[in-house]
Image: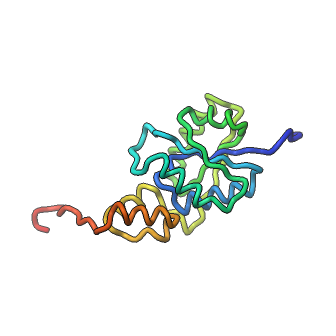
Amino acid sequence: MSRAGPVTAICPGSYDPVTNGHVDVIRRASGIFDRVVVGVVREPTHKGLMFTVDERVAFLRHALSGIENVEVEVFAELVVDFARRWGARTMVKGLRAISDFEWEFQMHHLNRTLAPEIETMYLIANSQYSFVSSSGVKEIASFGGNVDELVPAPVARRFRELFPAPRHGAPVSPQE
């Protein structure tokens, strides 16, 4: 197969917020493809957001600033249409656990129905990030936990601004 130009892949997600696991997958994808376009979903319909799209983009651009062949763009369309717009024939996704696989398996088949020419490549999470999720990080931070090792520095700083004092949970039972 001859190449007419640079091979582009997309790494789509909500990145609410970006974690060090996301950064690892994107960095590894940048070593495989000539260009990686990180697609930030403007308003995902299946989850609520903590951070604005501008914050999510800024966090990503900061975290990925040393990788020359990576761009960060916002999209509000089908992911396959975003891929086509950028001339990408591959979507790169990270997998941490079986639960990720179940969701991604469904999404893969839906996307293949819409765009059979676009492949999905899965990169298995580095073991040091296999337990890190955006939702887990938000939960830890909201209760005042330290997330410095889980997210890029600007994200950790923003969490400290949002949650300056530890929040105490409600008792599970009246006896507590």
Side of 123 relative to 147 (left or right): right
24 in relation to 103, above or below: below
Side of 101 relative to 162 (left or right): right
144 in relation to 106, above or below: below
Residue 106 at x, y = what percent?
54, 39
Residue 132 at x, y = what percent?
48, 62
| Rendering quarter of residue 111 | top right
| Rendering quarter of residue 164 | bottom left
Residue 108 at x, y = what percent?
59, 39
**Which residue ends up furthest to the top in the rendered image?**
114
Q: Nearer the viewer, residue 98 or 81?
A: 81
* Residue at (44, 66) in percent of width and height: 157
How is the model colour-coded? rainbow
Residue 141 at x, y = what percent?
37, 64
**Which residue ends up furthest to the right in the rendered image?**
2
Point out the image quarter for the C terminus.
bottom left
**Which residue ends up furthest to the left in the rendered image?**
174
* Residue at (49, 71) in percent of width and height: 149
* Residue at (57, 57) in percent of width and height: 22
Q: Nearer the viewer, residue 16 or 111?
A: 16
71 in relation to 31, above or below: above
Q: Nearer the viewer, residue 131 or 60?
A: 60
* Residue at (72, 57) in percent of width and height: 68
Side of 58 relative to 11 (left or right): left
Point out the image quarter for the N terminus.
top right
Total number of numbered discs in the rendering:
0
